[in-house]
Image (cartoon, coloured by chain):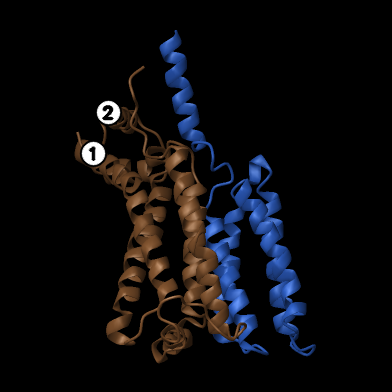
Amino acid sequence: MWARIVEFMLACWLALSPFVFAHRSDATLLWTSDLTCAFLVALFSLLSFNQRLNKMHLGNLLVAFWLIWVAFSWEFPHEKAIQNNLVLAMLFLMLAIVPSESHLPPRPWRTFLKEKEDGKKT
Amino acid sequence: MAKVYNPSKWGPRVAICLVAAIPVPIATYMGLFQWGLIDSFWDPFFGKETEGVLKSELSHEMQDIIRLPDAILGAVAYIGDIIFALAGSNRRWFDRPWLVALFGLDVIPVSLVSATLVFMQAFVVHSWCFLCLVTACFSLVLVLLSYDEVFASITFMHRVWKRSRSKRVVWNTFIGKPSKLAYEIAREIEKNGRKS
């Protein structure tokens, strides 16, 4: 679950970014994009803690692609804001593919190995 | 108890994380200089040559394309090495081969390309940069530390293909679905090593 915690912390930074990089107050689309992306990343990461929704973190891939698209196609007040979003997008891309219970084997393998062990015992 | 071959055990993976963690601040330091957030750059051997490398035309051209200083991209790549080294169980070479493949793609080709680019700087930019060389050396060490696991996973997948001749079985094994065949091959490699 460490990947989800890191994603959540990065989402908090993304939410602060428009203030830190001083987006113009009339750049409504940029504010909306950054804050919505931050909300979605935090949401997907937190939902992944639920067993039934533990693949929700894959939604962060879409957010990362959106951030990359925005960085290459929209106008930002200054270059640093683009670069901040790009770095975050790359980190989201890498973290989103880390499974929630990544320290354990995938569930089908766990079941398979348990059956094998039970079979050996009996 | 017989020794079991396991290229995904935590010891070597934590070592990879530690080795990858060293060039992250170095690359970030270079990135801060490229960003203009620090005025001068420390280099014990090549002095002002380093600044020439980091602010070269080639570096500016790359920044126009990727929109990031190349050193920052390098720092992100090293963080990626840490993320992918930490992800997965201590048997991931057979229970999540896709993850090992991603790890391999992040470490081996990226490190080799970046190291080659750094060593080529003398011929293109006609200057040297000590810290760039240090990070390139770390990249090569990362390749050495990670290749065993990546090749174990490739060997495993190759044997699954050789014995099943089924794209479906290979795909299912790759994405982490178990099968009797995959289990038997994994046990065989654990017992005899990947070179057997």
Q: Are marks 1 and 2 in contact (CB under 8 Å)?
A: yes
Q: Residue furthest right?
A: A25
Amino acid type of the residue that numbered disc 1 sits on in the rendered structure: Arg
**Front position in the image: A30 or B90:** B90
Mark closest to the chain's N terminus, 1 or 2: 1
What residue is drawn where x is 50% and y is 54%? B82
Place residue A13 in its image quadrant.
Answer: bottom right
Determine which residue is flagged by label 2.
B188
Q: Position of residue B127 (x, y in %)?
A: 35, 85
Determine which residue is flagged by label 1.
B159
Which-is-in-front pick, marks 1 and 2? 2
Secondary structure of the residue carrying numbered label 1: helix
Number of numbered tags placed on the structure image = 2
Colour of chain A as rendered: blue
Residue B51 to residue A88: above or below: below
Crowd band around label 2 with a 10 angstrom C-alpha radius: few (<14), some (14–19), many (20+): some
Amino acid type of the residue that numbered disc 2 sits on in the rendered structure: Glu
**Which quarter of the image is occupied by the C terminus of chain B?**
top left
**Front position in the image: A98 or B132:** B132
Letter of the brown chain:
B
